[in-house]
């Protein structure tokens, strides 16, 4: 932070120098906003003083305007924008050497109560990139009112995935959860993608701005609910218990004093959802395979409380304080698809957030913002059963849940300081961020032990032998006989030791960037970001960024024809505290994890009354530990892009952007002491030559992965007085050899063997959302999202190379007479590869696509006393001479009388066409369910129904 301090000191000196230079002059600056606090860009602002020519300016992309070097005296400030009533402020006194801050609030015209606020004119500013999506006002009503579902929708709209990731920011702070929608005034997606201010790429960055208090008392209440008889059935179950969701959201805001305001919001949800089990099990009596479906009720509740207080402190400081309490409970979580009801666990999650922001307007050219955030997370999870976990690949997961008891206490601290200086053609921003996390965790994960069977047939043979031993002990099959018949578990694992661990981690970043207007039509945006963190050896990551935008001239007194943009930069990813916690916990001392290949003691465990001798001896049973590679470094993405923004007429804007990305040093976990290739025989678990001379499994976090991606996106919007539509289409291709920190390669000594289609490679994405106001105070809000097929990995369900990972893939079959050959719609594969056969590429299967159409229809009623009309703007001077053929003035449009109260009713449908969207298919080749989807995709935030109908009501004043 020393560098930030030096930069701050230098810019403060610049500010004082400027103040001294203007001497006897003053200034006026502020923001143009609507009554909800949403900023209005491109608003015309005029400063008028008696006896002098008026001064004019335009608010920028974030609604800010300023007049500098004003002569002392009394001024009248006027602001106006399309679809808004003009605002006037008289008696604004400018004094020598002082900066007057004034917010101009424009009332929305009667027939524009939910207008989308956006600039009509192309702008080369970096934050006005056409590829961005900015939602406010009526736009927000197209989105879900449930914070969890809203988060999912926004991630889909951002086109985020495992490579670029998704980062949420709430009022400039790093966030893990979203506030209720009633507290949101604006959402910005993929804005200013190459900015050095952010550690993440703009594509996948979602910024949430919350509402401040207003100058008059305002309030709103919203309530929504659905019940199971209204909804479409889940196609995977014949009968399911009743379920429902009820939620309400309310807020009240207003002034405290003339310089202070408040905003208070509360959201609550009460729900009973249904999780559907769709698996294949053994009949308890006959031990024959049979399909099994079950609907399990999963009750849950949540409450979200968030007050905010804003105070203009003197002429320089504006203080904002926001607190948030988020608490949720859930029962019977962890159930569904292959997970049987015995896998259920109950959980409670509590998050408290305190945010403090001090915005300092030292002069019209110098703005500084200091932010502090504290997040307190307390999460608890308790399994309903502590029996040994039983995993049968491609069939079911039973027994107790191996996540065990988990009590996690995290404390996050974040400090930011961002300084913006306007100096001639330069718009300079410098700043820094420091984040610290303390994670205290108690976990009994896998203390109950876990058996893994390669197939349902292997499990059936084993259970039949166990039954024979019970009925006829004299003829009880030996473990060797069971395994010779094709039975026996493939792997047993169990963790023992101290369940408690505490880790601390910190990361810091400083940046500087300059939006330099070289000429009026060209803006060059160079920047540099430096990042560092604890928890790994790499402590110095430099990320240069560069952007350029050219406004193609449109002729004299005409707007630009288009804006052409280009940019590139390096973006780093951070090693998280969860990785550090795992490495320090399972280090072989704090905890030990035992792995036994082909165990012969099923169903016993290493902590049973008479533990098998293999748990304490046996070379194949050395503990499994986690470690961090001493050379671990932060992964980075190199991004380069080219785009063009173009307006078509008055109502349509389009933007096309091509993006290339290359990922280097991406995270992956390797078993660095796995048997060397070609030395392990699956029929002999004691075989295999290991490089370190022991039979210990060492799972090491590495940064050896790579990725590459090409993406073309087309964004568009259509806006009229009564309609607003926005959307995008993206086509892309992504390849990688890792799926993230917790993924293992199929060959521990050749990561590039997994180079191929990335797990997040969805080739086509599209969405459309918006609003339309209909006659009779009706309005509709459509939302349509589409994704083409997602890939899934095809595996054999066995550990063929002794690395304890069940991610080995089959080969393309060359001898169709072998019993290990499977004929599928994706090809003919051999599950027991032999020399000369080619292993199939990773993520070779193509899963189902997804299409979701949501629609909301609402009707509002206004009543109560009429609100006073805003003062009319000054009438233009009458013309002294009438020109021939001059058109008579247009007849004034009849305006609706605005009233104090509004009551509304609505109905909304999620997946209105009842189109079934399926989860990825089963990828285990030996499973009878291979290639089939066994669950619905979670497109509505739950899997209770295929289509959900909600009814709602709202009231505001």
Image (cartoon, rainbow, N blue to C red):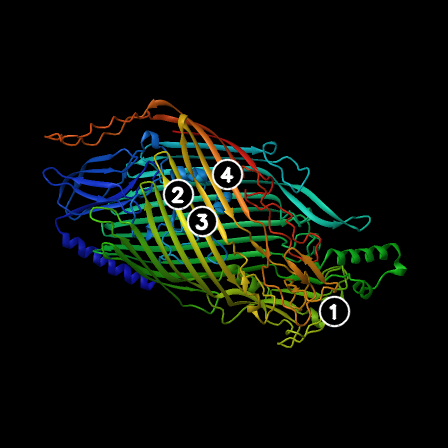
Sequence order check, earlier mark of 2 and 3? 2
**Numbered circle sitting on residue 854:** 4
Residue 135: mark: 2
Mark 1–mark 2 CB contact (< 8 Å): no
Q: Residue at point 17% right, 30% down?
A: 886
The CA span between labels 1 and 2 is 60 Å
Q: Earlier in the sequence, mark 2 or mark 4?
A: 2
Residue 16: image quadrant is bottom left
- Is the residue 160 above or below the residue 93 in the image? below
> In the rendered image, which residue does mark 1 sit on?
683
Secondary structure beneath disc 2? strand
The residue that appears at 46% across and 38% down in the rendered structure is 782
At mark 1, the secondary structure is loop
In-front residue for pair 844/399: 844
Secondary element under disc 3, as helix, strand or loop, is: strand
Residue 729 placement (x, y as % from top left): 45, 49
Answer few, some or many: residues within 10 Å of disc 2's Cα (few below 14, many 20 plus, some between 14 and 19). many
Q: In whole angstroms, how far apart are the C-alphas of marks 3 and 1? A: 51 Å
């Amino acid at each position: 932070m020393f560098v930030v301090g030096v930069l701050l000191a230098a810019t403060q000196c610049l500010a004082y120098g400027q103040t001294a230079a203007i001497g006897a002059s003053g200034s006026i600056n502020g923001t143009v906003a609507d009554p909800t606090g949403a900023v209005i860009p491109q608003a015309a602002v005029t400063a008028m003083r008696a006896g002098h020519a008026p001064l004019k300016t335009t608010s920028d992309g974030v609604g800010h305007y300023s007049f500098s070097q004003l002569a002392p005296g009394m001024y009248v400030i006027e602001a106006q924008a399309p679809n808004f009533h003009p605002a006037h402020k008289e008696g604004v006194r400018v004094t020598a050497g002082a900066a007057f801050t004034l917010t101009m609030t424009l009332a929305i015209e009667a027939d524009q109560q939910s207008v989308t606020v956006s600039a009509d004119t192309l702008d080369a500013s970096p934050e006005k990139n056409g590829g961005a999506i900015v939602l406010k006002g009526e736009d927000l009503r197209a989105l879900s009112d449930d914070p969890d579902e809203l988060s999912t929708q926004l991630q889909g709209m951002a086109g985020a995935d495992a490579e670029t990731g998704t980062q949420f920011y709430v009022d400039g702070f790093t966030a893990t959860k979203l506030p209720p929608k009633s507290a949101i005034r604006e959402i910005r997606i993929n804005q200013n993608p190459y900015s050095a201010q952010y550690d993440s790429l703009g594509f996948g960055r979602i910024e949430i701005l919350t509402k401040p208090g207003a100058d008059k008392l305002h309030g709103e209440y919203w309530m929504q609910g659905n019940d199971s008889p209204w909804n479409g059935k889940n196609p995977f179950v014949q009968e399911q218990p009743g379920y429902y969701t009820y939620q309400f959201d309310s807020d009240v805001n207003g002034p405290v004093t003339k310089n202070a305001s408040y905003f208070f919001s509360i959201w609550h949800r009460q729900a009973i959802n249904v999780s559907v089990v769709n698996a294949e099990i053994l009949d308890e009596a006959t031990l024959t395979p049979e399909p099994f479906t079950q609907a399990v009720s999963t009750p849950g509740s949540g409450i979200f409380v968030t007050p905010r207080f804003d105070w203009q402190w003197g002429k320089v400081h504006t203080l904002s304080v926001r607190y948030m309490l988020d608490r949720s409970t859930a029962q019977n979580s962890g159930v569904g698809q292959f997970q049987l009801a015995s896998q259920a666990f109950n959980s409670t999650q509590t998050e408290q957030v305190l945010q403090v922001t001090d915005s300092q307007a030292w002069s019209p050219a110098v703005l500084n913002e200091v932010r502090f955030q504290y997040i307190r997370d307390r999460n608890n999870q308790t399994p309903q059963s502590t029996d040994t976990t039983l995993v049968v690949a491609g069939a079911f997961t039973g027994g107790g849940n191996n996540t065990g008891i988990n009590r996690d206490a995290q404390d996050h601290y974040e400090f930011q300081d961002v300084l913006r200086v306007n100096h001639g053609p330069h718009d300079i921003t410098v700043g820094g961020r420091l984040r610290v996390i303390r994670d205290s965790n108690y976990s009994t994960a896998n203390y109950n032990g876990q058996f893994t069977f390669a197939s349902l047939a292997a499990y059936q043979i084993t259970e039949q032998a166990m039954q024979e031993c019970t009925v006829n002990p004299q003829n009880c099959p030996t473990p060797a006989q069971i395994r010779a018949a094709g039975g026996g578990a493939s792997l047993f694992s169990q963790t023992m030791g101290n369940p408690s661990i505490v880790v601390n981690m910190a990361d810091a970043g400083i940046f500087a960037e300059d939006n330099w207007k070289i000429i009026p039509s060209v803006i060059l945006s160079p920047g540099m970001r430096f990042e560092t963190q604890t928890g790994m050896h790499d402590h110095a990551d430099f990320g240069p960024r560069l952007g350029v935008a050219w406004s193609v001239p449109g002729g004299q007194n005409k707007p630009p024809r288009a804006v052409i943009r280009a940019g590139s930069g390096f973006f780093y990813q951070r090693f998280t505290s969860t990785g550090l916690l795992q490495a320090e916990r399972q280090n072989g001392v704090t905890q030990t994890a035992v792995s036994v290949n082909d165990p012969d003691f099923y169903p016993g465990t290493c902590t049973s009354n008479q533990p098998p001798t293999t748990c304490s001896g046996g070379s194949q049973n050395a503990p499994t530990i986690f470690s961090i590679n001493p050379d671990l470094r932060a992964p980075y993405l190199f991004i380069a892009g080219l785009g063009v923004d173009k307006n078509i007429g008055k109502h349509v804007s389009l933007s096309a952007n091509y993006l290339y990305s290359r990922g280097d040093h991406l995270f992956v976990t390797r078993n660095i002491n796995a048997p060397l290739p070609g030395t392990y025989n699956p029929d002999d678990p004691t075989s295999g030559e290991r490089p370190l001379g022991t039979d210990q499994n060492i799972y090491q976090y590495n940064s050896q992965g790579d990725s590459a991606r090409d993406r073309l996106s087309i964004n568009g919007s259509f806006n009229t007085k009564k309609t607003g539509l926005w959307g995008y289409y993206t086509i892309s291709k992504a390849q990688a050899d890792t799926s993230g920190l917790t993924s293992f390669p199929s060959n521990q000594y050749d990561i590039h063997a997994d180079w191929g289609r990335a797990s997040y490679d969805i080739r086509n994405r599209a969405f459309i959302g918006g609003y339309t106001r209909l006659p009779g105070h009706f309005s509709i809000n459509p939302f349509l999202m589409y994704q083409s097929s997602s890939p899934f990995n095809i595996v054999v369900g066995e550990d063929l190379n002794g690395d304890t990972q069940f991610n080995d893939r089959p080969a393309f079959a060359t001898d169709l007479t072998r019993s290990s050959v499977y004929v599928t719609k994706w090809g003919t594969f051999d599950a027991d590869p032999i020399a000369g056969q080619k292993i199939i590429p990773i993520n070779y299967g193509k899963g189902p696509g997804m299409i979701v159409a949501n629609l909301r229809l609402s009707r509002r009623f206004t009543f109560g006393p009429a609100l006073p009309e805003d003062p009319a703007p000054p009438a233009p001077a009458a013309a002294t001479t009438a020109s021939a053929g001059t058109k008579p003035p247009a007849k004034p449009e009849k305006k609706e009388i605005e009233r104090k109260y509004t009551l509304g009713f609505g109905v909304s449908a999620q997946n209105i066409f009842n189109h079934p969207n399926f989860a990825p298919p089963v990828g285990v080749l030996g499973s009878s369910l291979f290639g089939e989807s066994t669950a619905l995709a979670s497109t509505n935030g739950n899997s209770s129904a295929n289509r959900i109908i909600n009814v709602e009501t709202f009231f505001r004043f």
